[in-house]
Image (cartoon, rainbow, N blue to C red):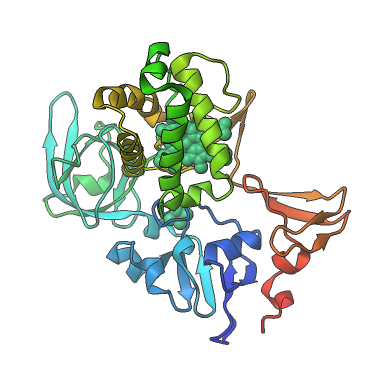
Amino acid sequence: MCSDKNSRVLHYQGHAVVCRDHETALDALLRAGAPIPFSCKSGICHRCMVRCIDGDVPEAARRKLPEHQQARGCLLACQCRPTGPMLLAPLSAEDSVTRCRLEAMNYSGDNRWQLVFDPFTRLTYRPGQLAKLMSERLDGECTALFISAPEDETLVTVELEDSTRLPEWLRATPREGLEFCLRGPLPVEPAEPVTPLPPEPGLWDELGGDSMVRAVLTTFYTKVYADPELRPFFERVTIDRIIGKQFAFLKESIQDQPVFLGEQPRNSHNWMVITDVLFDHRQNLMLQAMREHGIPDDLIARWSRYEEQFRPDIVKYKPWLKRVGDLLVDTEQYETCLLEEATVCDYCGDEIAANTMVRYHKRIGRLGCEACTASAAADGAP
Ligand code: HEM
Ligand code: FES
């Protein structure tokens, strides 16, 4: 790897790019067309986590990670403003598991085993989600279902999905104190999208009609666009556009007016990794906006139901495929094409000539000229 401490060359999976002054490591790698996953860009979803093999990891890029991941050199690329060269790599199996200590293993009858354990780092999960359990050596994988309620208990309880075949590492005795690894919670995609609530046309007028709903949405999205955790999702959407979309969506849902031309929430949020906590945070900003406009509590509750109903279509730990007609499309990928006409580079504004091969991220769609997407050597790096 480059040894010049002043150059911020990032190496990742065969791509080498010099990180520019205003860029995070994630932005630089995306500009270079590197296959790095991401979603929130605000340090919440951890999709952009990579490991630093060589180079200095800035404090801000690792402080949100548990100690064992920090010790392994893991970092969040979206929070990383490199101070020198870095050799980065995707996470290995060891990096993406949570280590746990078994406290008890109870037989609950009917061929069912429950495991009660203490995770070394905090687990965010809901009852009903699935996880993979495996030995410390990462073998002997089995599937388990979370059954404890994280808000009530510090210890976690899961039930093994197939208790008839215990893996070797779980047959060891004594079991108490046994250390093992957990991967999860695994993303569960609901089989069918939410069936929306029936409209309640009277509610629209009780709320104060078009002008009041629009005023509340304007206050709400002003808060969203100022919020460090929510703002990055809206990087490519203007505030007027999203207010217009949300207004039409609510008018159609509540007042039964066919005015919404967009996508249903499950499809439009397919790439957004949104936890329950982040969803609650959004709803709290909405509550504040409604209160600031003097909407009474009973109407707030009735309006909120039209938003809350989409939680299962929006909260997830991994992007879902996007449905386009009968097809399921992976939007989190790059594509290559030959430009039929000249266009302008989305990074520096220079022209990209017709007949140039360009590589672009399917969802973001930004096109870069040769200088902006070139590997570090051609970019003037030593
Ligand atoms: C934390 C929670 C949420 C986040 C971060 C979020 C974020 C976003 C973003 C970034 C877009 C723009 C997508 C694009 O144009 O590419 C969007 C669109 C939209 N959102 Fe949300 N959203 C959240 C919750 C909700 C909820 C609860 C509803 C239910 C009412 C909702 C309804 C919509 C609708 C109707 C659109 C327009 C879809 C279209 O363009 O056709 N969102 N949201
Ligand atoms: S934490 Fe970096 S993209 Fe979400």
Q: Quadrant of residue 299?
A: top left
Residue 74 shown left or right of residue 359 in the figure: left
Number of marks present in the image shown:
0
- Residue 110, percent across and down? 17, 23
Residue 318 shown left or right of residue 21 in the figure: left
- Residue 103, percent across and down? 12, 49
Q: Nearer the viewer, residue 35 or 363?
A: 363
Q: Nearer the viewer, residue 200 or 364?
A: 200
Residue 168 shown left or right of residue 86 in the figure: left
Of the 4 image quadrants, the one containing the N terminus is bottom right
Q: Residue at x 37, y 25 (%)?
A: 309
Q: Residue at x 69, y 62 (%)?
A: 347
- Residue 214, percent across and down? 47, 31
Q: Is residue 281 visible?
A: yes
Q: Is residue 268 visible?
A: no
Q: Residue at x 84, y 50 (%)?
A: 339
Q: Nearer the viewer, residue 332 or 222?
A: 222
Residue 197 position (above or below residue 227)? above
Of the 4 image quadrants, the one containing the C terminus is bottom right
Q: Residue at x 72, y 59 (%)?
A: 368
- Residue 275, percent across and down? 36, 43
Q: Nearer the viewer, residue 3 or 241?
A: 241
